[in-house]
Amino acid sequence: AGHFGYRKRDQHTWVQNFKLCDGKLQSPISISSFKSITLPLPALEIIGYHDFLSSPLYLKNNGHSVVVNVNNHLGKRLPYIFGGSLDINQEYEVDHLHFHWGAKNNRGSEHMLNGIRYPMEMHIVHRNRIYSSLSNALNYKNGLVVLGIFFQEEDNKSLYSIVNHLTSVRWINNETKLNTSITLGSLLPKNTDVFYSYKGSLTTPPCNEVVTWIIFSMPVPISFSQLNKFRLLSNGNNLIADNYRKLQNIGLRKVYIRKL
Ligand code: BO1
Ligand code: ZN
């Protein structure tokens, strides 16, 4: 029951094995700046994102995505976030990052922004520090914060360290050690002042409704050749590309926007 697929007919069967996927607070959604509520939110504080992550860092193909785990930083304090739309006194430590991408440039991102679907969306998944593990945090509605970062086609040097290792993780369960250190900060958009926030879910089974989403308005550049390296990744039977969930109903939810 840990298996799930992204083809349309497969996505319709998620709810059979994972009841939570049928909830009222599901992700992703289509975000419109016009329909969002402007709030005078404080800045999102992003701490330790410019420190090099302690090595070794591993890149892994898990059959659904490609993942960089950053939760095994013995000795060091993990990069964390607070402020913005998050509850006061709640700090969220980084756990891992992963990507959702399309086989073509006209698709790949999970969220849509003002009618645009970007070719890729990165998720930096954070766990509320009061919970001991990611699986533990999945039981609480203030358990996770995911930063959603859109990519648009244009050259980008900062992604090279991850992209250059993708050929080593072409197949499911392939794992490789990154030979250069990275900082999370290099993966963020140049401007993090403007973002959208709403309450939603994991975009994959088991679809727990425990995620405060923070979606940056500004995309990060990625080149066509870099995107094509993601597009070669395989789960053994098929390409992983198009690993984005269909849009979910916004229902009664509100989306907030912080602007300058
Ligand atoms: S996402 O950022 O909403 N796409 C997202 C989706 C799933 C997870 C985190 C963020 N969590 C993972 C857990 C795994 C579990 C998997 C199920 O969900 O980290 O332990 O196996 O697919
Ligand atoms: Zn994701």
Image (tube, rainbow, N blue to C red):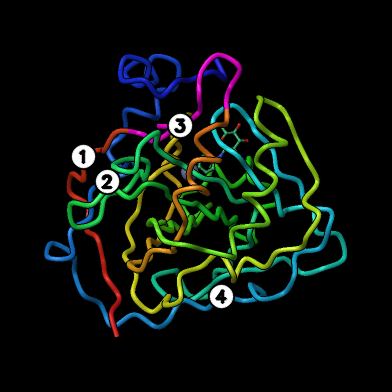
Quick check: 197 left or right of 165?
A: left
Q: Amino acid at mark 3?
A: Ala
Per the image, the residue denoted by label 3 is 241
Q: Amino acid at mark 1?
A: Asn
Per the image, the residue denoted by label 1 is 249
Tell me if mark 1 has few (under 14), some (14-19) or many (20+) residues whose alpha carbon lies within 10 angstroms of its own.
some
**Any magenta on residue 162?**
no
Tell me if mark 4 has few (under 14), some (14-19) or many (20+) residues whose alpha carbon lies within 10 angstroms of its own.
some
Q: Amino acid at mark 2?
A: Ile
For the C terminus, the image quarter is bottom left
**Displayed-image quarter of ligand 1:** top right
Q: Is residue 112 above or below residue 175?
A: below
Instruction: Name the residue located 59 percent from the left edge and 69 percent from the top edge.
Output: 186
Decide: marks 2, 1 in contact (CB < 8 A)? yes
Instruction: Name the residue located 45 percent from the left edge and 31 percent from the top edge.
Output: 241
Residue 29: mark: 2
The residues bearing labels 4 and 2 have C-alpha atoms spaced at a distance of 24 Å
Looking at the image, is mark 2 or mark 1 earlier in the sequence?
2
Per the image, the residue denoted by label 4 is 46
Decide: marks 4, 3 in contact (CB < 8 A)? no
Instruction: Name the residue located 71 percent from the left edge and 54 percent from the top edge.
Output: 70
Percent position (x, y) of residue 227?
48, 45
Percent position (x, y) of residue 32?
17, 58
